[in-house]
Image (spheres, helix red, strand yellow):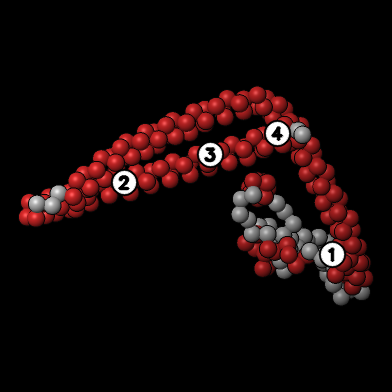
Amino acid sequence: MNVTEKINTFIAEYNNKLNQLNERIESSSKRVTEIEMEIKYISQKELPEASVQRVLSSESGLENKLKKTLIKLQTELEEKNEEVLILQNALQQYHFQAANELKQYQQLFKDERAIAMDKIYSKMMSKKREYVEAMKEEAEVLHQFQAVDLQIQLVEQAAGMKKDVYNIFTVDSAPMPSHLKRYNGIYLALTHEEVQKIIKKTPIDLGYLDKFKHTKNL
């Protein structure tokens, strides 16, 4: 297992533990809110009504029961508030503990990434070289057509049918993506900005390449 794999395993365990702690905090916090609402309802509605009922009917059973319930809820509220506080402190401590544990991998990770980056960018350059060589190879046919066109013009000139001969080689590739329609969807260049977007996985429209997927049909 390389360093990156070890870190990914560590992060997976870290996130799993975080989820567990956050779920417990959320559950306890929800219970705190429920208890506070129960206490408020009993204190502001049920208990005052029970006290009035005791005065009118001399029956104190419900009032006593509600008072006991209040004491029980207040005790639970204190416990839950303390639990939330402990869990929050534990969560913060776990963040700190995990960050310290990760330090042992940092330099090894940097070294591993540096080696990988060198290899990956070298591969990209190799593919770029193949791309440039492919353009040069395919362009040979265009040069052949240009040579034939020139010969035709020379014959016409010799026959007096043409005064001037034009040997202008044009490249029918859009200078920028916005000019694609004018060049039948051909755009061979990649700007530095486009390269950055591709490598960084920033959204970029490469749909114009789709119709060239199947090279066997070309």
Q: 215 or 98, which is in the foreground?
A: 98
Residue 185's image quarter? bottom right
What amino acid type is highlighted by mark number 1? Thr
Give the spatial CA distance, label 4 vs label 3.
18 Å
Quadrant that contains the C terminus:
bottom right
Whether pointer 1 and pointer 4 mark residues with C-beta atoms closer than 8 Å, the reply is: no
Name the residue tied to disc 2. Answer: 35
Give the spatial CA distance, label 3 vs label 2.
26 Å
How crowded is the residue under tag 4: few (<14 C-alpha within 10 Å), some, or many (20+)? few
Name the residue tied to disc 1. Answer: 215
Of helix, strand and loop, which one carries label 3? Answer: helix
Which one is closest to the eye, mark 1 or mark 2?
2
Q: 99 or 153, which is in the foreground?
A: 99
Give the spatial CA distance, label 3 vs label 1.
49 Å
User: Which is more N-terminal, label 2 or label 1?
Assistant: 2
Whether pointer 4 and pointer 3 mark residues with C-beta atoms closer than 8 Å, the reply is: no
What amino acid type is highlighted by mark number 3? Leu
